[in-house]
């Protein structure tokens, strides 16, 4: 028995030594054997294919859920000719001042309901004579503008097709810096494209893009043609409408902006129900509070928005608000800067009395203001916008 055990131990030692020598001097022999075994196992497997697995950190499920609801939008606008372009003498001196080719545009959109409502940017469809919507499954439809809101640069379209995929609306108020997101759209007209990144910042404003700004900033690549496309979370839920980029070259530089879905839902609801967006207005010229302005108007407030001008006979003037007053609250919402004041006032119902807390000099007081209907304002766009 002892001799048998000794022979076994010696045999194992010799085999291990042989394996070590082959692995060191001729490793391809072992690799070839492994490769052949792998090929045989694949050939013998049912369907001749290895089962697909989702790698850790993959966002394929989010893209799969959201992508069918993202559409490409192509617009055309009739060429603008000079009114005297057919006059031979005018053409002799000034040449042909108008082409016959229509102006074309490119953007993206998101189907938000199975009955055909689509959210996109106002600047994508503004002034368009024809709007062609292409779905991810290659179906085409003529888009009809239901309503626009230049103040947020949003527009609502409608198409008439069956079995439309609708995206799930998320909760953009729950987003945090560092959350993973996907941007889906049709950049440069190359076809639907998905890019990934994170939420870089929240509440970006004072960019001079829209009247009401509360942007989600992301480093997911957004390029011209992405405007109106979807910014989605890891579950494929819509968190924002891609709108603009910061760029010196015309392409993505890792700074993109999206309108939160919380704002988009309000605009969508107003346009679908009433055909327009209704906002409050009080007729003041607000400024961020600074030590210089506080000293100029003799106010002792430490926070709030200082009013430097009041429109005569406007809602604020009728309620008793004066230049130099510092507004600190609108109803129950505290305001710390101009953008927050604009947003709070815009959310008020025209004709319904609202409470304004303010400070005048050293005195704190409350006034009740009946806001009016906010007048339409032209949208402002920057050269770096994603068209």
Image (spheres, rainbow, N blue to C red):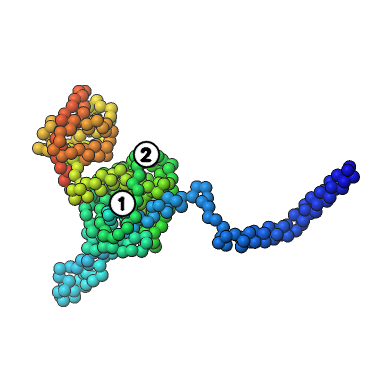
Residue 181 vertical placement versus 88 (above, below): above
The residue carrying mark 1 is: 112
Q: Residue at x 22, y 69 (%)?
A: 98
Quadrant placement of the C terminus: bottom left
Who comes first in sequence, dot 2 or dot 1? 1
In percent of width and height, residue 99 lies at 24, 70
Which residue appears farthest toward the top when viewing the image? 363
CB atoms of marks 2 and 1 within 8 Å: no
Relative to residue 44, is residue 25 drawn left or right?
right
Q: Residue at x 84, y 47 (%)?
A: 8
Of tags 2 and 1, which is closer to the observer? 1
Residue 164 in sight in this render: yes
The residue carrying mark 2 is: 174
Residue 249 in sight in this render: no
Which residue appears farthest toward the left when viewing the image? 313
Task: Depth check: give the residue in front, 98 or 32.
Answer: 32
* Element type at mark 1: loop
Q: Residue at x 9, y 37 (%)?
A: 313
């Amino acid at each position: 028995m002892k001799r048998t055990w000794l022979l076994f131990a010696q045999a194992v030692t010799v085999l291990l030594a042989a394996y070590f020598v082959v692995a060191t001097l001729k490793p391809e022999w072992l690799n070839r054997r492994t490769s052949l075994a792998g090929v045989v196992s694949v050939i013998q497997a049912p369907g001749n294919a290895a089962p697909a697995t989702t790698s850790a950190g993959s966002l394929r499920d989010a893209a799969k859920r959201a992508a069918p609801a993202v559409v490409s939008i192509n617009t055309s606008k009739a060429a603008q000719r000079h009114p005297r372009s057919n006059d031979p003498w005018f053409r002799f001196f000034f040449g042909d001042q108008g082409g016959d080719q229509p102006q074309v545009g490119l953007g993206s959109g998101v189907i938000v309901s199975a009955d055909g409502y689509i959210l996109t940017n106002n600047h994508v469809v503004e002034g368009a004579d024809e709007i062609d919507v292409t779905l991810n499954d290659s179906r085409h439809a003529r888009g009809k503008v239901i309503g626009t809101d230049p103040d947020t640069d949003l527009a609502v379209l409608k198409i008439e097709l069956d079995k439309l995929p609708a995206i799930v609306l998320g909760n953009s108020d729950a987003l945090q810096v560092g959350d993973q997101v996907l941007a889906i759209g049709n950049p440069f007209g190359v076809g639907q494209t998905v890019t990934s990144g994170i939420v870089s910042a929240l509440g970006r404003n004072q960019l001079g893009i829209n009247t009401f700004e509360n942007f989600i900033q992301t480093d997911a690549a957004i390029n011209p043609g992405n405007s109106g496309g979807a910014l989605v979370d890891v579950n494929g839920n819509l968190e924002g409408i891609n709108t603009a980029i910061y760029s010196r070259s015309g392409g993505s530089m890792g700074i993109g902006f999206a309108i939160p879905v919380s704002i988009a839902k309000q605009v969508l609801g107003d346009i679908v129900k009433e055909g327009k967006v209704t906002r409050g207005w009080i007729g003041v010229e607000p400024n961020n509070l600074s030590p210089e302005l506080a000293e100029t108007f003799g106010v002792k407030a430490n926070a709030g928005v200082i009013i430097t001008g009041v429109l005569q006979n406007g809602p604020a003037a009728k309620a008793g608000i004066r230049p130099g007053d510092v507004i600190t609250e609108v109803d129950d919402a505290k305001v710390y800067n101009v953008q927050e004041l604009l947003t709070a006032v815009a959310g008020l119902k025209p004709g319904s009395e609202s409470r304004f807390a303010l400070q005048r000099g050293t005195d704190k007081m409350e006034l009740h203001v009946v806001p009016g209907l906010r007048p339409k304002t032209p949208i402002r766009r920057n050269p770096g916008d994603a068209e």
